[in-house]
Amino acid sequence: MDNLIIHIGYHKTATSWLQKEFFENEKLNINSIAPYHDRAKWVTEFIKPDYSFDKQVLQEYYLQAVDKSKINVLSIERLSGYPITGGFDAIIIAHRLKELFPSAKILISIREQRSMIKSIYLEYLKAGGNAKLEELLYPKRFYLIRNPTFNLDYFKYDYLISEYLKLFGEQNILVLPYEALKKTPEQYISELSSFLGLDQDLSLVTSSLNLKKQINTQLPLAHGYKNRLNARIFGSECTPTRLNIPNRYKRVFNILMRLSPLNYNKRLEEEISLFIEKIPETYYQESNALLEKLITRDLSNYGY
């Protein structure tokens, strides 16, 4: 396990690009332990409650997928928790990773909080979510409050990162801002390659990557608004039960939405912006300052 790197996310930090373009790049000496078609089985085991969690299953998955001649990367953003449930099991998963892979190196990618919240919410709507952003944070029904739910504190990255530093050691942790990939991609690739232990020429590594390729692109605001309204009326794939409404009614609904003069793009943009503006400017200030000290990196260059 000495050549194992675990990339835990966070979500919406170019994880899909890293997985497809970097970790599954056949030109690089990297073995992706959990490629897309296998990722669900890993996630299913990692998020089981303690009474049914079986680390031997994950050990078997690892032994079946590992390639000792290559750098092995386990990249699953769900390992950092799930944003819509407030990352309630993120620390539990961190300790499971330490128990399973004690000598692994940990890669963590982060993103400026307000940009992250907006992107997470649009991904939620893309998946069929039907709640407004404010409704996620402040559920009106008690039975919803009893469930793990969206929490702004999940984006105080120092909580989880400090735990990984304690578990795996400072020398085995690399934290990369999503914005660095956009602003200084060559430096980002250089840091990542060095951390992975790639002995290939950096120029060859960079030339093998499509830095402009977009994977799992952000849902257009207008589509997000329509998706949410559709899910509220007809149900969605992410709800346990759906209304048994004939497809002809859904087709009529979609036609009416297209014919409507309303600017859905503007409506959702204003709604999200209004909610984000309610978050105090200093809300993440202390957390980001602590994080800068933990990872010895100036985050103000990236808008944090």
Image: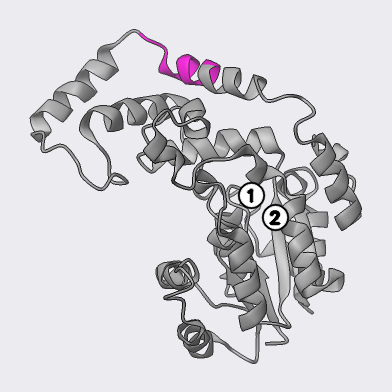
Task: Locate the C terminus and report the quarter of the image it occupies.
Answer: top right
Q: Which amino acid does label 1 sit on?
A: Thr
Q: Residue at x 56, y 54 (%)?
A: 88
Query: Does residue 153 appear to the left or right of 302 in the view shown?
Result: left
Rendered position, 131 above or below 107: above
Residue 144: % across, % down: 40, 39
- Viewer-closest of 51 and 43: 51
Q: Which residue is drawn at 32% across and 46% down?
A: 238
Q: What stretch is highlighted in magenta?
A: 262-270
Residue 109 has which mark?
2
Task: Locate the N terminus and report the quarter of the image it occupies.
Answer: bottom right
For the residues marked 2 and 1, what is the alpha-carbon distance in whole angstroms? 6 Å
Q: Which residue is drawn at 86% across and 39% down?
A: 301
Residue 21: % across, % down: 59, 62
Quickly name the residue at label 1: 13
**Is the magenta region chiefly helix, strand or loop?**
helix
Q: In which quarter of the image is residue 225?
A: top left
Q: Which amino acid does label 2 sit on?
A: Ser
Say what secondary structure mark 2 lies in: strand
Q: Residue at x 47, y 20 (%)?
A: 268
